Image (cartoon, grey):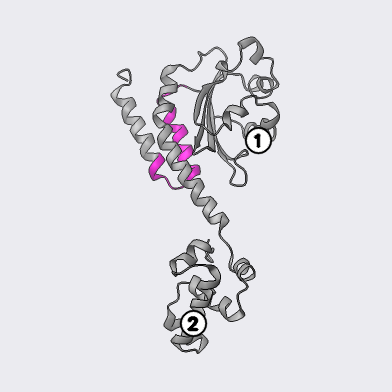
Amino acid sequence: MSHFTINEWLILNGIIYNIYTTSDFTEMRQKLLQQLKLVIDFDSANFYLASKDSPHQLDSPVWMNLEPEFTEKYLKNYNKVDYATGIMFSGNSLIYRESDILPEQDRIRTDYYRMFYEPYQFHYSLHFAISKNNMFLGILSLFRKKGEPDFDVNDIMIFDLLQQHLEYQMYSRFASITEVHNKLTLNEAVHKYQLTRREETILNYLLQSMGNQVICEKLCIANNTLKKHILNIYKKLGINQRVQIFQLLKTNNA
């Protein structure tokens, strides 16, 4: 580890800080590519996320020194030509060089090389497939052009240092998106749990965080009557606390 300079350690600390503090994941990944350029020599890069609809689909690319057509073409063709998809979607975080998968004479003859390396004068690449709890989360790729050396152990070590941090933040983000995605809308809850019209109205007010007194005034009912309606709603939804409503249903802002 002593071959990292103090400046490189400071840059790596800045990268880790960015991973944890930049809430917008597009911005975080863009900053990450810019910062990596300070410690790893590469010509171009991209960073895809796993699609929220399928763990074996790529989505939301960001890139550096690449034409947009590259990522568009890759999204359309990777399942057909990228021979490393088995590694990418293995469910384990893996750092690998393209040159380690196939012998040189075989690699340059593949459709993948001819489609994504030759047209852009790339020859070497370093990939970081990020997964946690057997769930693929995204892939970060760096490219070098012909005439440049392959990525080395030092470059791989930098990815290795970032592994746990990216796994944690990306898994937390994916779990949060999945949770919101799985929540019910008010209409879905009404049909699923067979709520009455009055229960639907009260549940809508509860989702707006209205207090009991305000709801009673709006509906012109006594507080005891409201409490009976709320208990019936809880029983139908299978919950016993108001906070669980927000865990089960989407709010108007979700």
Q: Where is residue 236 in the image (x, y as percent from the top left)?
A: 55, 71
Magenta region, main secondary structure: helix
- 74 is higher (above) or lower (below) than 41: below
> CA separation, marks 2 and 1?
54 Å
Residue at position x 43%, y 47% in the image: 23
Which callout, 2 or 1, points at the residue further toward the start of the chain?
Answer: 1
Q: Where is residue 209 in the image (x, y as percent from the top left)?
A: 45, 72
Between 226 and 12, the residue placed more toward the observer is: 226
**Residue type at the position of mark 2:** Lys
Q: Position of residue 207 (x, y in %)?
A: 50, 70
Q: Mark 1 points at which residue?
A: 75
Q: Does the magenta stretch include residue 135?
A: no
- 165 is higher (above) or lower (below) than 41: below
Between 25 and 187, the residue placed more toward the observer is: 187
Q: In this view, does 75 lie to the left or right of 232?
A: right
Residue at position x 39%, y 42% in the image: 20
Q: Quadrant of the N terminus?
A: top left
Quadrant housing residue 34:
top left
| Residue 132 appears in view | yes
Graded by Cα atoms within 10 Å as few (under 14), some (14 to 19) or many (20 or more), the crowding at tag 2 reads few
Q: How many labels does the image show?
A: 2
Q: Position of residue 36 (x, y in %)?
A: 43, 29
**Residue type at the position of mark 1:** Leu
Between marks 2 and 1 in the image, the one whose residue lies nearer the viewer: 2
Residue at position x 61%, y 19% in the image: 121
Q: What stretch is highlighted in magenta?
A: 19-41
Residue at position x 38%, y 35% in the image: 15
Q: Is residue 39 magenta?
A: yes
Which residue is most to the top? 105
Label 1: state its secondary structure.
Answer: helix
Q: Name the residue under label 2.
A: 228
Q: In this view, does 76 lie to the left or right of 241?
A: right
